[in-house]
Image (cartoon, rainbow, N blue to C red):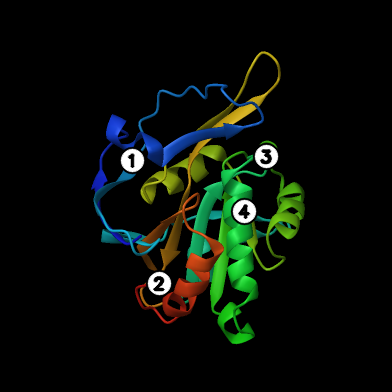
């Protein structure tokens, strides 16, 4: 589905579906007084999974730690390449593994030359549990060894997420020990031409087939 979007200053009732809780316990609330900046759909079609932004997002200035324990500068390391950016966490029971799996399937079918022009970056919203080592193991299992995992200070990650319209809240542990986290499920596609995100996908709606169809165009800096 191809959509045109506008930005809202804060989370509203009409945009509630942009954020949802996911964790080890269904029904557990993730409390947070934050009002994240989110993307709100203005109009919707029924043909493409991609959402075309009226106002592209700049790639965040973000320096975190990768799965090898090395510092990773997002802008510097991914400049000039199609960059797919997703904020999530490894203990997520549904949206995150589904999104990573779908992208891995689409990535695997690309020619090697196109794979070299693409970077998928997964930034954890649960850095306390998602150490670089654990994040690396999970990405290799759920996705692809080429996928990049980043971990670091929660506030730094939150600020970066909000700068690209993705809301998140700290993981919350219930009395029975179950953990629930709230995060937006948006995959942002930053063009190799200008390093800005003109296109976003819903991690729960976009399929492997959608990505497989769109990635060759996105790699060339084209809109899907």
Q: CA distance from mark 1 to mark 3?
A: 24 Å
Q: Quadrant of residue 102?
A: bottom right
Residue 142, can we see it? yes
Q: In which quadrant of the rendered view does residue 118 lie? A: bottom right
- Other-residue count near label 2 (Cα within 10 Å), few / some / many at <14 / 14–19 / ≥20: many
Upstream in sequence: badge 1 or badge 3: 1
Considering every residue shown, the one lying at the far top of the view is 175
- Can you give x and y, in whole percent of width and height, for residue 164 in the image? 38, 51
* Front of the two marks 2 and 4: 2
Residue occupied by mark 2: 191
Pointer 4 local density, CA inside 10 Å: few below 14, some 14–19, many at least 20: many
* Residue at image mark 1: 37
Is 197 on the left or on the right of 121, as rendered? left
Q: Earlier in the sequence, mark 2 or mark 3?
A: 3
Q: Determine which residue is flagged by label 3.
A: 91
- Marks 1, 3: nearer the viewer: 3
Q: Which is closer to the viewer, label 2 or label 3?
A: 3
Earlier sequence position, callout 4 versus callout 3: 3
Q: Rounded to the nearest whole Å, what is the CA distance between mark 2 and mark 1? A: 22 Å
């Amino acid at each position: 589905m191809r959509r045109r979007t506008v930005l809202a200053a804060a989370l509203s009732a009409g945009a509630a579906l942009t954020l949802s809780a996911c964790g080890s316990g269904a029904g557990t609330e993730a409390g947070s007084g934050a009002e994240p900046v989110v993307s709100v759909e203005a109009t919707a079609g029924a043909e493409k999974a991609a959402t075309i932004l009226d106002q592209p997002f700049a790639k965040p200035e973000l320096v975190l730690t990768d799965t090898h324990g090395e510092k990773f500068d997002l802008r510097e390391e991914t400049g000039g390449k199609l960059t797919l950016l997703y904020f999530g966490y490894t203990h997520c029971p549904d949206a995150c593994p589904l999104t990573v799996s779908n992208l891995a399937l689409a990535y695997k079918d690309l020619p090697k030359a196109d794979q070299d022009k693409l970077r998928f970056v997964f930034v954890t919203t649960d850095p306390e549990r998602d150490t670089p080592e654990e994040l690396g193991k999970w990405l290799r299992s759920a996705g692809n060894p080429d996928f990049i995992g980043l971990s670091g200070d929660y506030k730094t990650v939150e600020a970066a997420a909000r700068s690209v319209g993705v809301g998140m809240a700290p993981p919350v542990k219930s009395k029975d020990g179950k953990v629930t986290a709230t995060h937006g499920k948006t995959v942002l596609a930053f063009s190799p031409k200008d390093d800005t995100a003109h296109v976003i996908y819903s991690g729960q709606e976009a399929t492997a087939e959608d990505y497989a169809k769109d990635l060759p165009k996105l790699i060339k800096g084209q809109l899907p």
